[in-house]
Image (cartoon, grey):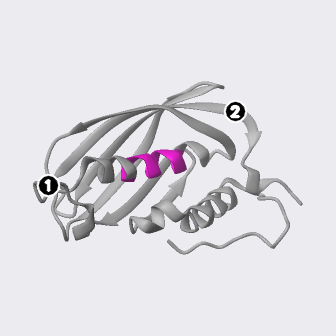
Amino acid sequence: MHVTLPPSGSPPSSPSDTCALLAAAASREPYAAKLGMRVLLVEPGRCRVEMRVEADLVNVFGITHGGAVFSLMDEAFQLACNAHGTTAYALNLSVTYILASTPGDLLTAEALEIASTARTASYQVRVVRADGEIVATGQALAYRKNTPLPFLEPG
């Protein structure tokens, strides 16, 4: 994802500025980098992240560890719910694993906001392989605080 940032020190002037700043912050996140995640899209209430399954992400059966799939889903969820520009925290992420993936597979997670109030928001999250087969689905719930994201505040 190509990110164009607003001038240094200036607050975001639009939702797309906020999303660009959030994507840039995600690109510096150590855990996501360790798993090889790459942000493809960030919009308010929607995000897409991909990850190639490497050999060190498998379980004893040689398939992708559920924790790696969960982490990919959580990353997409985190970005989608924070892309509104205010701090949001996960209250729940319930996952159903449908199909195995293996080393070399390119997985893409998409989180989509399906309902929201002033304090909570519900998301559907889905992970697919490059062939379009669904690997996992999830339902997530976020709690929204009324505070701006820390890297959006001037100074």
Residue 28 percent coordinates (x, y): 58, 68
User: Callout 2, which amino acid?
Assistant: Lys
Which residue matches tag 2? 145
Q: Badge 2: how crowded within 10 Å, few (<14), some, or many (20+)?
A: some
Tag 2 secondary structure? strand
Q: Is residue 120 left or right of 146 when viewed as pictured?
A: left
Q: Magenta segment range?
A: 72-80
Contact, mark 1 vs mark 2 (Cβ under 8 Å): no
Q: Earlier in the sequence, mark 1 or mark 2?
A: 1
Which residue is situated farthest in the left direction here?
61
Which residue matches tag 1? 60
Image position of 145 with respect to 72: above or below? above
**Magenta segment: does it hold 18?**
no
Residue 51 percent coordinates (x, y): 34, 64
Which residue is situated farthest in the front direction here?
60
Residue 150 percent coordinates (x, y): 75, 51
**Prevailing secondary structure of the magenta residues:** helix
